[in-house]
Image (tube, grey):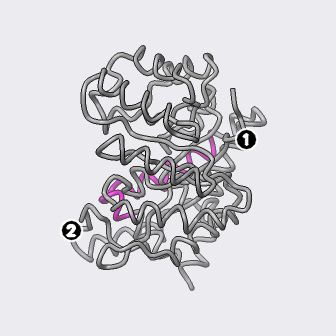
């Protein structure tokens, strides 16, 4: 099992301007902020980064912008695309610019189509492939867990970004020697307990230090500390999940000085009142330990 990619990876937010064009300057600033917190790398153009909605030129520009700043940290590039040809092009581009691995959501279709997609991508990619298991988003892929296990056995498949609460299946994959990244932020400690070697998550952008606390406690076998910090992280998630999640995530990051602009999907708050209510609730109810660790109140005052 390769552990060189283990650790904590924020699912990177793709900064856009009002016309939905990629903004490299904000991307650079956000990456440097995350790396300064001590994360092991970042995962770009996935669900959080709206990779499937971005034009190919922006997906390439994202990699070209971030890679020179990685300073030895790892870049994992989601290359999922409507066609396998586009996915392979993105994989080759990621390899050319020094990424550590690629990942991809499964395509729409039956189990045979899913297997053929991953077979082609794994065989033609110069970089190791991390599968993306996300039943909520791709419910027809891997309906039989054995299909996921079988695809993990393909050459050049390193492991799985596992966004599900089926920790029994996660542990089965770990025991077989696969690299597993826990995908649901609210269950990182549970995933690590069952053997995941790291995590990839959206709210790692907001509070990377908290997820690093969970990860390092898990490495030391200090599960009580991991549980306490997970509970604190979940208190923040409790706030964010009251609102449209991705607009809320971007609003909080804007408050922290990283204006990532609108979503490609067009999703937004229902009103400015809702936006303001979110930030007010964060100011009032974020756990003190989290606020101090990520310097939320000083950021708010600024």
Q: Quadrant of the C terminus?
A: bottom right
Marks 1 and 2 close (CB-CB < 8 Å): no
Task: Tell me the magenta residue range.
Answer: 227-248
Give the residue displayed 42% in from the left and 14% down from the top. Answer: 146
Q: Is residue 236 left or right of residue 299?
A: left
Q: Earlier in the sequence, mark 1 or mark 2?
A: 1
Determine which of the numbered discs, if any, sits on residue 104 in the image.
none
Q: Quadrant of the N terminus?
A: top right
Q: Is residue 205 above or below residue 176?
A: below
Element type at mark 1: helix
Give 248 or 286, whichever is nearer the viewer: 248
| Residue found at the very far left of the displayed protein | 270
Crowding around mark 1 (Cα neighbors within 10 Å: few <14, some 14 to 19, many 20+) is some
Q: Is residue 273 above or below residue 12?
A: below
Q: CA distance from mark 1 to mark 2?
A: 39 Å
Q: Is residue 228 left or right of residue 56?
A: right
Would you say residue 247 sits in the magenta stretch?
yes
The quarter holding residue 2 reads top right
Determine which of the numbered discs, if any, sits on residue 217 in the image.
1
Element type at mark 2: loop
The quarter holding residue 193 reads top right
Give the residue displayed 32% in from the left and 71% down from the top. Answer: 262
Give the residue displayed 67% in from the left and 44% down from the top. Answer: 7
| Residue found at the very far bottom of the displayed protein | 302
Crowding around mark 2 (Cα neighbors within 10 Å: few <14, some 14 to 19, many 20+) is few
Give 234 or 171, whichever is nearer the viewer: 171
Residue bearing mark 2: 270
Q: Position of residue 100 (x, y in %)?
A: 63, 47
Q: Position of residue 264 (x, y in %)?
A: 29, 64
Q: Position of residue 90 (x, y in %)?
A: 45, 51
Q: Is residue 29 left or right of residue 20?
A: right
Would you say residue 141 sits in the magenta stretch?
no
């Amino acid at each position: 099992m390769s552990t060189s990619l283990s650790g904590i990876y924020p699912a990177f937010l793709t900064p856009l301007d009002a016309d939905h064009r990629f903004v490299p300057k904000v991307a650079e600033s956000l990456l440097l902020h995350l790396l300064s917190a001590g994360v092991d790398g970042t995962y770009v153009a996935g669900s959080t980064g709206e990779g499937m909605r971005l034009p190919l030129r922006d997906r390439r520009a994202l990699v070209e912008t971030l890679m020179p700043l990685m300073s030895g940290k790892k870049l994992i590039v989601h290359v999922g695309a409507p066609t396998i040809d586009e996915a392979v092009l993105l994989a080759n581009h990621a390899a050319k610019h020094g990424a550590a691995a690629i990942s991809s959501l499964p395509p729409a279709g039956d189990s045979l189509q899913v297997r053929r997609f991953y077979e082609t991508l794994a065989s033609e990619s110069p970089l190791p492939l991390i599968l993306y298991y996300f039943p909520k988003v791709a419910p027809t892929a891997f309906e039989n867990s054995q299909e996921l296990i079988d695809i993990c056995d393909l050459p050049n498949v390193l492991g799985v970004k596992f966004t599900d609460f089926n920790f029994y299946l996660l542990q089965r994959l770990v025991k077989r020697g696969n690299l597993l990244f826990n995908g649901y932020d609210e269950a990182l400690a549970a995933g690590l307990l069952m053997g995941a070697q790291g995590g990839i998550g959206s709210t790692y952008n907001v509070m990377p230090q908290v997820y690093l606390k969970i990860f390092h406690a898990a490495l030391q076998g200090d599960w009580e500390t991991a549980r306490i910090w997970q509970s604190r992280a979940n208190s923040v998630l409790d706030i964010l999940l009251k609102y449209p999640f991705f607009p809320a995530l971007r609003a909080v990051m804007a408050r922290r000085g990283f204006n990532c602009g609108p979503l490609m999907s067009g999703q937004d708050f229902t009103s400015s009142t809702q936006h303001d209510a979110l930030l007010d609730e964060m100011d009032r109810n974020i756990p003190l330990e989290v606020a101090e660790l990520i310097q939320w109140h000083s950021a708010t005052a600024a």
